[in-house]
Structures are given as C-alpha cells and as structure tokens.
Amino acid sequence: MCEHPEWIPNYIELNNSAGNWSNYLNRIYKRFCDDLVIRKAFFRDGYVGVRKIPETDGKGFGFWHCISEGKMEEKRIPDLERCKRIGWIRAIIDNTDKIEVEHWENIRGREKCHLLWYREEYLVVLAERKNKINGKKYYLLKTAYCTKGQTRVKNLRRERDAYKKTDAAP
C-alpha cells in the first residue's frame, strides 16, 4: 500500500464502528457535514456548496451521491471504498496546489466542471455555478469517487491530457 501525504486524512473504516452500518453511516455523515456544510470549503474564487435535497434517511443528496454508486439515482448502493475516503473530499479541495492533485475542466451537460484528481485514485467533481440572488460564483460538489478500473482511468487520462494541450489549461 502506498503512503499518502500528511494532508490526506486516514480512512474511516466500517470496522472502527464495530461493523455497525448505522453507526458508521452516522460517523461518516458527521465528517461530511463538518468538512463541507458547517465549515465551508473554498475553491478558487468561491465557496463549495453541497446539495441537500432530496434527503434520504435525514441525510442530504450530496452526501449519498459521494458514498454510493449506480446509474439510476434511486437505485444507488453504498460503496465502502467511497465511504472510507469521505474525509478526502475537503482535503483535496483544500490542497489543489499540491503535486498529487491534477486539475482540469470539462463540460458535463451544460455545466462547466472542475475535476480534481488525486494520484489517479480519487476524483472530486465541482460544478461552477452562479448564485441567483447576488450573481457570485460558487462551486457545487457534484460527486467524488474512487477511479478504479482501467477503462475509467484511461478515459480520465485522455480527457485530462487533451485539456492540458489547450490554451485553457491553468
């Protein structure tokens, strides 16, 4: 297993909650809220917002999307690899200047997104938005996930490399 830099938090393991899923879920939800709701994260020139509705079991949509996988929202299932890395989201957003984090932009649907890729292992996706009231820019956490699988990594590399060849690259 490779060593992570000191700014990457330790995994939050299910077995540290005595294997009790409910306790574990509450523990990682608290971490998510502490990191991204109570204590706002900032990226570039705006804060990072988290989608709260619709809620499931009293927990916001953004949280569920970051800890589960599946093509259809209502049928997504928890992924323990995502769960144990929940503390990485804030750490990666706060450390985009580190060599371990690659950043590029893309358009997903009609949204401009910022992709933050930690060591080709974990991806955080932030959508650029404008506040409807004051017009200020902010970023919505769309998702975060482990980039396992050769096809996914290959596709992300291709997208990243194509972006870096453009004049838009930072």
Image (cartoon, helix red, strand yellow):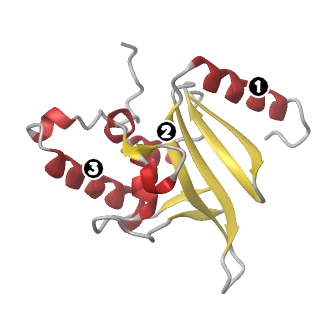
Q: Is residue 143 above or below residue 82?
A: below
The residue carrying mark 2 is 145
Horizontally, is 29 left or right of 136 in the view?
A: left
**Alpha-carbon span between mark 3 and mark 2:** 15 Å
- Circle on res. 130: none
Quadrant in the picture for the N terminus: top left
Q: What amino acid is found at the position of numbered circle 1 in the picture?
A: Arg
**The residue tagged with tag 3: helix, strand or loop?**
helix
- In this view, the residue in front, 69 or 96, is 69
User: Where residue 46 sits in the image (x, y, percent)?
Assistant: 62, 64
The residue carrying mark 3 is 28
Crowding at mark 3 (Cα within 10 Å: few <14, some 14-19, many 20+): many
Instruction: Write the residue at 40% across / 34% down.
Output: 8
The residue carrying mark 1 is 158
Q: What amino acid is found at the position of numbered circle 2 in the picture?
A: Tyr
Crowding at mark 2 (Cα within 10 Å: few <14, some 14-19, many 20+): many
Q: Is residue 121 above or below residue 56?
A: above
**Alpha-carbon span between mark 1 and mark 3:** 32 Å
